[in-house]
Image (tube, rainbow, N blue to C red):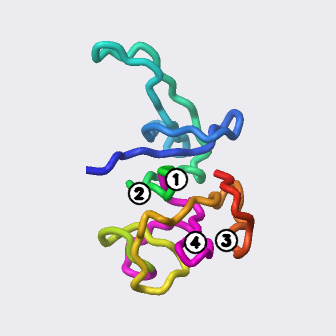
Amino acid sequence: MREILFRAKRIDNGEWVEGNLITNERNEHKKYIGYIFDERNGVIEDFDIVEVIPNTICQYTGLKDKNEEKVFIGDIIRCTKGCPHEVIWMKEYAGTFIGGMPAVYLSGLDKGYAWTGEEEIVGNIFDSPERLKGGGSNEKTN
């Protein structure tokens, strides 16, 4: 079973935070990420819940890139051919297959491309959307 994890930008300072997605049933427009800082003997001793910018919420795919970094929906991946592709969620079959149907795909790839583990995160659509236009540096920005 894959780890269920989310990340999003904090509403107060724009920093990325990872954890569990928490919704507000009284205000469906507010979203939160919660995470545990300290647990001892099965007792949670310190945790935090922060409000996040809803349109930046990204779910972990269960995949890691060649640097063992977790791959999230919205990441920009350099495929093994060297070109950038956005990690997307599709409810209908189309694009390049990574996992079940509906599934996670890399946008703009021909059918038949399979995840090798040699792909690399080079950014994300929120912080570095220009990387999708091709080229870009070899530096990891995420």
Of pointers 4 and 3, the one earlier in the residue sequence? 4
Q: Nearer the viewer, residue 43 or 55?
A: 43
Q: Is residue 48 above or below residue 92?
A: above
Instruction: Report how far apart the C-alphas of labels 3 and 2 lie in the structure.
Output: 20 Å
Residue 23, x across and y down, in percent: 45, 40
Closer mark to the observer between disc 3 and disc 1: 1
Residue labelled with disc 3: 132
**Helix, strand or loop status at disc 2:** strand
Check disc 2 and give the amino acid type.
Leu
**Helix, strand or loop status at disc 4:** strand
Closer mark to the observer between disc 2 and disc 1: 1
Q: Residues within 10 Å of mark 4 (few under 14, many from 20)?
A: many
Residue 79, x across and y down, in percent: 54, 72
Cβ–Cβ under 8 Å for marks 4 and 2: no
Cβ–Cβ under 8 Å for marks 4 and 3: yes
Q: Tell me what residue is drawn at x 70 percent, y 57 percent.
A: 139
Of pointers 3 and 1, the one earlier in the residue sequence? 1
Residue 4, x across and y down, in percent: 36, 46
Q: Tell me what residue is drawn at x 59 percent, y 53 percent.
A: 55
Q: Is residue 140 magenta?
A: no
Q: Write the start and end of the magenta stretch as one range.
A: 70-95
Q: Tell me what residue is drawn at x 69 percent, y 63 percent.
A: 138
Label placed on residue 63: 2
